[in-house]
Image (spheres, rainbow, N blue to C red):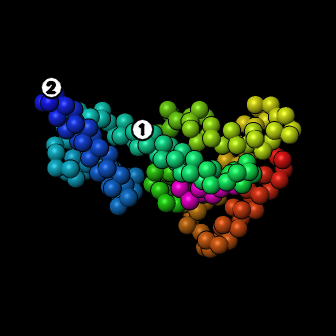
Amino acid sequence: MASKDRILRHKEETRTSILKAAHKIVKEEGWQGLSMRKIADRIEYTAPIIYEYFSNKESILEELTFKGFKKLSKHLEVAKAKHDSPEDQLEAMWMAYWNFAFTHTEMYQVMYGIQVSCCSKKCTVTDSPYQLFITVISEVMKGKSPTEEEIKQKYFTFFSVIHGLIAINIINRSDVSESINNQILKDAIGGIITSIK
């Protein structure tokens, strides 16, 4: 039995090493630099060993996407927990979302398809970040007795504005200073919150 546990542990460690190596390659070379061969070289295995764990590069990207959404959800939960009022929670969550995008840029790119093929097939509107936002938005809007469709629409209003600002900054690396970006972001979040109360 101990031998079987050891084999399982080794397999999980190898799988984790593959994902870490893939992420490190992407941080150094960008998504276009990722290949099964480079991952194999990085962890000092042969390429066929990598294929025992992941059928292709796409399956690695899907796993990294899944991990990215999980990590983003944790950041959002922490931000939400720091505030009592739904309005403050919502602002803190969108600020945490923004910060995640620039702290984990490579992960955010693959999660949302910015300059790389999007792998979020499994992580659709039912994903955890979406559910967290929807819950707080419905709390902010509860005085208006909103329908599910209205709440969803407000989520996508937030998402469109904030994701758009993030994408502009990731793609263009604009000359706009961080303080101006933060002010634009806060103005957008504050304006949308005011409109939905």
- Which quarter of the figure is the N terminus placed in? top left
Q: Is residue 138 above or below residue 4?
A: below
Chief secondary structure of the magenta span? helix
Residue 22 at what x, y percent from top left?
A: 32, 49
Q: Amino acid at mark 1?
A: Glu
Residue drawn at 39 percent across, 39 percent down: 63
Residue 12 percent across, percent down from the top left: 26, 38
Residue type highlighted by circle 2: Met
Residue position marked by numbered label 1 in the rendering: 62
Whether residue 29 is in magenta: the answer is no
User: Can residue 114 be seen by looking at this rendering?
Assistant: no
Q: Residue furthest right?
A: 144
Distance from label 2 to label 1 (Cα)? 32 Å
Front residue of this view, candidates 13 and 89? 89
Horizontal and vertical percent position of residue 179 = 65, 72
Question: How busy is the neighbourhood of tag 1: few (under 14 within 10 Å), some, or many (20 plus)?
Answer: some
Residue where numbered disc 2 is placed: 1
Q: Residues within 10 Å of mark 2 (few under 14, many from 20)?
A: few
Q: Is residue 111 above or below residue 147?
A: below
CB under 8 Å between discs 2 and 1: no
166, 9: nearer the viewer: 9
Seen in the image, is 177 located left or right of residue 184? left
- Secondary structure at numbered mark 1: helix
Bounds of the magenta span? Answer: 91-101
State the residue at coordinates (22%, 37%): 9
Which of the two marks, 2 or 1, is nearer to us in this view?
2
Q: Is residue 170 above or below residue 87?
A: below
Q: Nearer the viewer, residue 96 or 45?
A: 96
Q: Of label 2 and label 1, which has the lower sequence position?
A: 2
**Residue at 85%, 34% in the rendered image:** 145
